[in-house]
Amino acid sequence: MSRVLVARLDSMGDVLVSGPAIRAVANGSRPDGSRPNDVVLLCGPEGTGAAKMLPGVTEVHTWQCPWIVNPAPPVTEDSTRGLVDFVRSSRIEEAVILTSFHQSPLPLAMLLRLAGVKRITGASTDYAGSLLDVRLRPGEDFPEDQPEAVRALGIAHAGGFVLPQGDDGKLRVNTAADDEFANKLADEGPYIVVHPGAAAPAREWPALHHAATVELLEAYGHRVVVTGGPSEASLTATVAGPSAQNLGGKTNLRTLAAVLERAAVVITANTGPAHLAAAVGAPVVCLFAPVVPAIRWAPYGVPLELLGDQEAACKNTRARNCPVPGHPCLSSVTPEQVLEAVERLLGGVASLATRRKVWKP
């Protein structure tokens, strides 16, 4: 059995969409009949929690990559030597470097070569020389406009790793069926999750829009649970209002996954929990700002309602803060539209026109 390093050095969502590729490396087999592998997943600090939940991962190693992490840590001899020493001592023979279109695998490939890794697979627009043994050319060997999960799986497949028979290639995480918190929540009746936060302000729907949506959902008989991290306590309190259940800061990542798994629908922006919802099979209403392409980054493999003006002026800017006054790509979406999207996912009526309540921001 070989030890293979799979690298995905950025955020929680990036790690989650890499799950199918990781399962291909870990549990699949090569066309030559090679046995499954031990997978060492190299990730950044933001992705560590998700990495530990992925099926097929034997070991997780966290490294602050100076060309990925923001704000960037300094490049030091100690930090680079630490990674090289770890890889060398881990008896890693092969590596698969997973990247998005704007990232290069070559700096990491250089360090892995210095650590003695014999075979490296990655996708690079730049000439890779002896740094990559298997090089895919983005835009030539595969289209850029495809889901990130499919892109990552394609890189793994180019390295010779295929999913095992019966694996549908969707996102997946290990969840706790016996999670007491989530089970108690579900025992109290069906619920819809509203997750109002996002890692970048440009991807956030306004908080008062979320709050009005919670009120509207409750008015139509839905029970609402609001989720968020410890730093989002003020936001989740505003959104939950006096009657929705506010779980802001009250769940770790594993419990959040269990809560999402038991939800009837999840309402969220393009953020890590959107991909976590997809990984547990929950239907998603995604308020998606077009600063990155939805075809690449929308929740993958689950029933989906995508809201937001995908042709707005901020399209493909990769902006963290909205460059357009008024944030029109998302602020133009009304709570009523979100409610209708929820109803469609639940199999309800196609339109709520006959029982609509007018909402004004």
Image (tube, grey):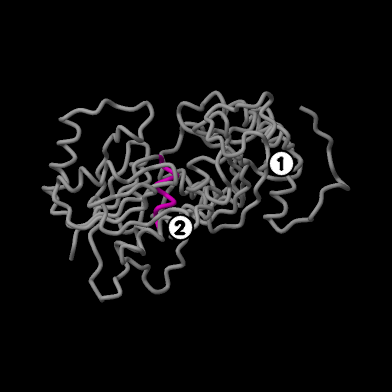
Location of residue 32 in the rendering, given as x and y in whole percent from the top left corner: 26, 76
The label nearer to you, 1 versus 2, is: 2
Residues in magenta, as a range = 11-19
Point out the image quarter for the N terminus.
bottom left
Describe the element under mark 1 as helix, strand or loop. helix
Seen at 62% across and 34% down, the residue is 314
Q: Residue at x 32, y 49 (%)?
A: 127
The one of 261 and 26 positioned closer to us in this rendering? 26
Q: Is residue 64 left or right of residue 340?
A: left
Residue under label 2, please give it. Answer: 140
- How far apart marks 1 and 2 lie (CA) works out to 46 Å
Q: Main secondary structure of the magenta part?
A: helix
Horizontally, is 287 left or right of 250 in the view?
right
Tell me the crowding category of disc 1: few under 14, some 14 to 19, or many 20 or more residues within 10 angstroms, Cα based: many
Tell me residue 154's x, y (percent). Answer: 41, 61
Amino acid type at circle 2 is Glu
Numbered label attached to residue 1: none
Outermost residue, left side: 89
User: Residue 217, labelled with which disc?
Assistant: 1
Residue 303: x and y, percent?
Answer: 61, 57
Q: What residue sits 33% from the left and 36% below the top?
A: 45
Would residue 36 be found to the left or right of residue 187 on screen? Answer: left
Counting residues from the start of the chain, the first of labels 1 and 2 encountered is: 2
- Residue 14 among magenta residues: yes
The residue lying furthest to the right in this view is 354
Q: Amino acid at mark 1?
A: Leu
Spot occupied by residue 37 in the image (x, y as percentages of width and height)? 24, 63
Which is more toward the observer, 228 or 278?
278
Circle 2 Cα neighbour tier, 10 Å, few/some/many (<14 / 14–19 / ≥20): few
Q: Is residue 234 above or below residue 137?
A: above
Residue 44 is left or right of residue 185, and the answer is: left
